[in-house]
């Protein structure tokens, strides 16, 4: 099992910035990549960004790729999501997830952190 704990959410005005953190523990070697997802009430969970633990590959949704940056600190087993130029439509609960080496699926999830962007 991989345990994930997110932090860094909050309330920010449009145009502002936030940095989310996701600390991983447990069998982290069971995971080859980490991702951020977000969800708003009544909508399906949406992919935001992902990074391999090697750091060689990163991915981001078109809606955020010019504003959000994903990074990792392997020494701390922590992944970050730097969010700049935030918009009200970025308001959501943001979840960190770890991709399982064996299934290829994001099987491990954090509890989520609320990000609210006011206009």
Image: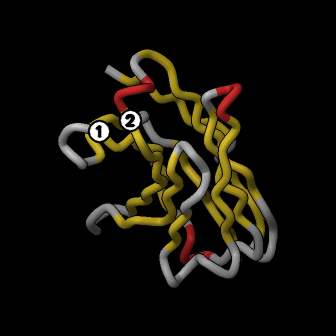
Query: Which x, y percent locates residue 98?
Result: 39, 40
**In the image, which disc is placed on residue 62?**
none
Q: Name the one closer to the observer, 24 or 93.
A: 24
Q: Is tag 2's residue or tag 1's residue first in the polypeptide sequence? A: 2
Mark 2–mark 1 Cα distance, whole angstroms, equals 5 Å
> Going 79% across and 63% down the picture, which residue do you hit?
17
Q: Which residue is mark 2?
A: 31
> Going 44% across and 46% down the picture, which residue do you hit?
33
Query: Viewed as shown, does residue 87 lie left or right of 110?
Result: right
Query: Which x, y percent locates residue 45?
Result: 32, 61
- Whether residue 93 is visible to the viewer of this picture, yes or no, is no
Q: Which residue is mark 1?
A: 100
Q: Residue furthest left?
A: 103
Query: Which x, y percent locates residue 20?
Result: 66, 47
Q: Are marks 2 and 1 in contact (CB under 8 Å)?
A: yes
Q: Name the one closer to the observer, 88 or 96.
A: 96
Q: Secondary structure at mark 1?
A: strand
- Whether residue 56 is visible to the viewer of this picture, yes or no, is yes
Q: Is residue 10 above or below residue 90?
A: above
Q: Is residue 14 above or below residue 45?
A: below
> Going 61% across and 29% down the picture, which residue do you hit?
77
Q: Name the one closer to the observer, 29 or 7.
A: 29
- Quadrant where the image shows the N terminus: top left
Q: Secondary structure at mark 2?
A: strand
């Amino acid at each position: 099992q991989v345990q994930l704990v997110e932090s860094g959410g909050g309330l920010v005005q449009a145009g502002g910035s936030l940095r989310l953190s996701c600390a991983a523990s447990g069998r982290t070697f069971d995971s080859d990549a980490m991702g951020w997802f977000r969800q708003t009430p009544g909508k399906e969970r949406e992919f935001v960004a992902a990074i391999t633990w090697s750091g060689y590959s990163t991915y981001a949704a078109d809606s955020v790729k010019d504003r959000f940056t994903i990074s990792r600190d392997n020494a701390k087993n922590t992944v970050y999501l730097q969010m700049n130029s935030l918009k009200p439509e970025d308001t959501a609960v943001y979840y960190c997830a770890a991709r399982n080496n064996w299934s290829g699926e994001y099987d491990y999830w954090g509890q989520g952190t609320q990000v609210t962007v006011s206009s």
